[in-house]
Image: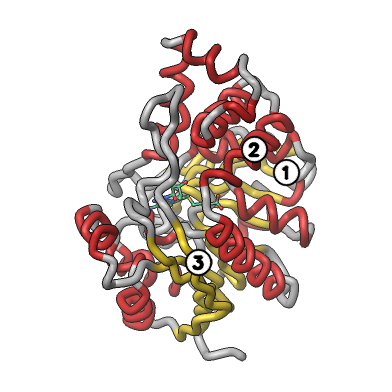
Amino acid sequence: MHTYLIEMLECPVCHDKLEWTISERSGDRIEAAEARCSACDAVYPVRDGIGLFLTPELPRNDMWDQVDSGVIQYLREHPELERQLMEVPLGTLAPADQFFRALVLEDRGKYHKAQITEDLANKDLYTQDYLNCWNSQMDYVIERLAETDGPIVDMASGRCYFVEKIVRKLKRPVVATDFSPGVLRRDRRWLESFGLYDHVSLLAFDARRTPFKDGAVVTLTTNLGLPNIEEPGSLLRELRRIAAGIFLAISHFFPEEDKSNAKVIREAGLQTLLFQRAALKKFTEAGWELEVKNPCVGSARPTPPGVVLEGARMDGLPVAETNLEWCVLLGSSKVTD
Ligand SMILES: C[S@@+](CC[C@H](N)C(=O)[O-])C[C@H]1O[C@@H](n2cnc3c(N)ncnc32)[C@H](O)[C@@H]1O
């Protein structure tokens, strides 16, 4: 993490000051350190350059880390499947299997090949509509970001798909955040291999309890990150607490009349942030002024399952073909144009 973050951070539990003991630096980065809360004595380490601000009392359902490492582990135990994934022409694999091949390439440190493979997989995993609407939202956010200054804090950055795009286009400081240290360690290796890491700080924390001071974040983004986070009310109040400027949230919503998808969404407890009306209400209740920008509707279908990794799917939703409503939710303390 970069040293400029010290000024922006506090104890995520009691919001008191942090006392920093830095044991390893590299230029304007902190590689190893301990930040101790002066009030509650909690200690937050920085390891391998990643700031770890996870708090013990919030349970974590870290399924992204589990899926990535789970696939690699499964393939280690089944070398014949790994051979089937890796030793056939790429174009003959189902798109989900292409994605799993990209994970293996990544695990072997072959990042450039992994990227080409993942891009190819995405073309057939998603409908053209889905990709067009999604790209349009990312382009819109990047255009808006170009009008702002200072570090951009991205929430639930996951595999850094969007962070990577921001850095490539704007060459601005970005703080990629996620509650999964494993995903962030992977992001560091990935960004380093493409020469993009210089711009990025990595922080692990729960988005419902962040280590940022009140109003410390001027520009906040997320790429489809919100619905995955539990307790949307606490999440949106916490983001409102730390935000001093704008929040650009790339979002997609399901039609309420779409019964098959709605059933699964409700069973998974994701109804608040995957239906537009409910999401807008929650944002407003949490104190955000909200505008819907760049709306766009596009068809989406269930991602096709793997054949080598039989039945494995990339995304749990949609479960039936539908039309997604895409947009950027622009949150601010006052309405902007
Ligand atoms: C689907 S990814 C988002 C995609 C990502 N923004 C991108 O551009 O590649 C969702 C991420 O949310 C993270 N997540 C889920 N709950 C969280 C929480 N409470 N706090 C922080 N991150 C969380 C997961 O670890 C996962 O990496």
Q: Kindly report the distance in space between the C-alpha atoms of the residues bearing marks 1 and 2.
A: 7 Å
Q: Residue at x 74, y 34 (%)?
A: 193
- Label 2 is placed on what type of residue? Arg
Residue 147 image offset from top left, x and y in percent: 73, 77
**Which quadrant would residue 255 be assigned to in this image?**
bottom left
Disc 2: residue Cβ within 8 A of ligand 1's nearest atom: no
Provide the secondary structure element on which disc 2 rests: helix
Residues under numbered marks 3 and 1 in contact, where contact means CB atoms less than 8 Å apart: no
On the rendered structure, is 27 left or right of 40? right
Provide the secondary structure element on which disc 1 rests: helix
Quick check: can you spot residue 23? no
Residue 321 image offset from top left, x and y in percent: 38, 57
Q: From the viewer's perspective, is residue 198 above or below residue 313?
A: below
**Sequence-wise first label, 2 or 3:** 2
Q: Nearer the viewer, residue 323 or 226?
A: 323
* Picture disc at residue 188: 2
Q: Residues within 10 Å of mark 1 (few under 14, many from 20)?
A: some
Give the residue pinned by disc 1: 197
* Picture disc at residue 100: none
